[in-house]
Amino acid sequence: MRGLDSNGVTIALVAIVAISLLQGMRRGAKGSAKQLVVFLAGAAMTLVSVAAAAWAATAASPRFQAWLEARAWVRPATDSSAVTQFAYTLFAGLRDLPLFRFAVLFLIAYLVLRTALGAIGSLIVRVGAVPFGLVPGGGPISRTFGGLIGAALGGGRAILLTAVLFAYCALSPQSAFADYIQQSALYREAASQIIKPAAGTLLAEQLPVFATSMQSEMDKLWQKRYDIIDADMPADIVTAAQKVAADDKSDEAKARALYQWVGSRIAYDNDKVDAYEQHGEWREQSPEDTYKTHKGVCIDYARLYAAMGRSVGLDVRVVTGQGYDGRGGYGPHAWNEVYLSERQAWVPLDSTWAKSGDWFDPPRFEDTHIRKA
């Protein structure tokens, strides 16, 4: 006969039920009943709040986006404070990123609903525990009832843990911990008999898709950090950008003039790359450093271009991802996207590669550049 399953997940699930049973016996029927009703009421209130918050966020999202677009908040000037730049970045993220907007609205709605339903939950707890008041407060009968109620409560807690582990396995199926979880026979049984039938495709299929999409939007929002970090531009960079684009009227002409200037004036810093690859030493530098030294790597090119572009009224963003290395592979890379009002479109450009050809919105740009988000 096979020995007991020594998997840590199995032990944790069994321990949850066992400890709850012992606690139930110690509390007796009255105390255990109250705990069970609190647990069930809390779970019910959470489910109701989640469902209502999801509905409210879905309904409010397009209206909120329209309201934000109507504000027509233009990008702050380069000498604006970090607080103003942060506020604009948050504003732009809520306006442009649907899942991020939904997540913020959902969180607000959930907190409001959960707080409002708290009073109802307290009433349910008081009313629901009344029938158990008929059971004697002590003695073997009370302890027996308490143990049974405690075991049921432990089962509910174990199911919740199983659901959490199931969601983790759906999100990270290739991880070592997911493989370890799957080795638990008790987890596999609970997941197949309870979680899968109850959740349907929500956890196994839809959750990973939503998480991937949400991560993509968070990456885009994270890339906007350069809007804040590089907001306060020195006067010499602003003056240089304005001089470079002085004779240009359209957004595209300004964007291309700056692309040519950055691409031709900045030299690629191979020593910086070697220091990082061989010694793990990363030399962080600002657009001002890049402008003064005329040296940098791809992220430095991109940050300088973005800073100069904003100095002449262009909407520019820094993009990170993978760039073709010329040897059949890809490596970490950074470039820019600039919004051209005459086209009403974002177009890509890579000033780091400007000396090797025309990388201002060339055909099939995406064949050599894979954006992270």
Image (cartoon, grey):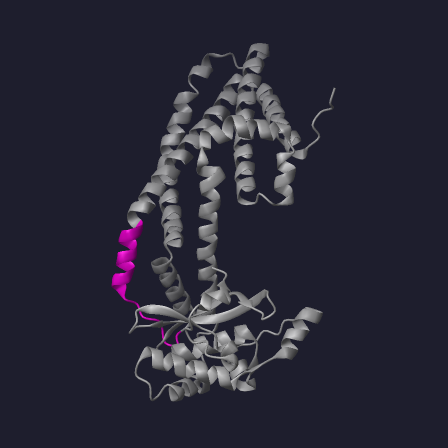
* Residue 48 occupies quadrant: top left
At horizontal 58% and vertical 15% (from top left) the residue drawn is 143
Rendered view: 142 above or below 261: above
Give the side of residue 121 with respect to residue 144, left or right. left
At horizontal 43% and vertical 87% (from top left) the residue drawn is 240
Taking the magenta stretch, the answer to whether it contains residue 44 is no
Taking the magenta stretch, the answer to whether it contains residue 64 is yes
Q: Which residues are magenta?
A: 61-80
Which sits in the foreground, 306 or 226? 306
Give coordinates of residue 351: x percent, y percent.
Answer: 48, 77
At horizontal 63% and vertical 76% (from top left) the residue drawn is 272
Which sits in the foreground, 35 or 90? 90
* Residue 256 occupies quadrant: bottom left
Give coordinates of residue 315: x percent, y percent.
Answer: 37, 72
Residue 132 visible in the shown view:
yes
Give coordinates of residue 255: x percent, y percent.
Answer: 38, 79
* Residue 166 occupies quadrant: top right
Which sits in the foreground, 77 or 204? 204
Rendered view: 241 above or below 200: below
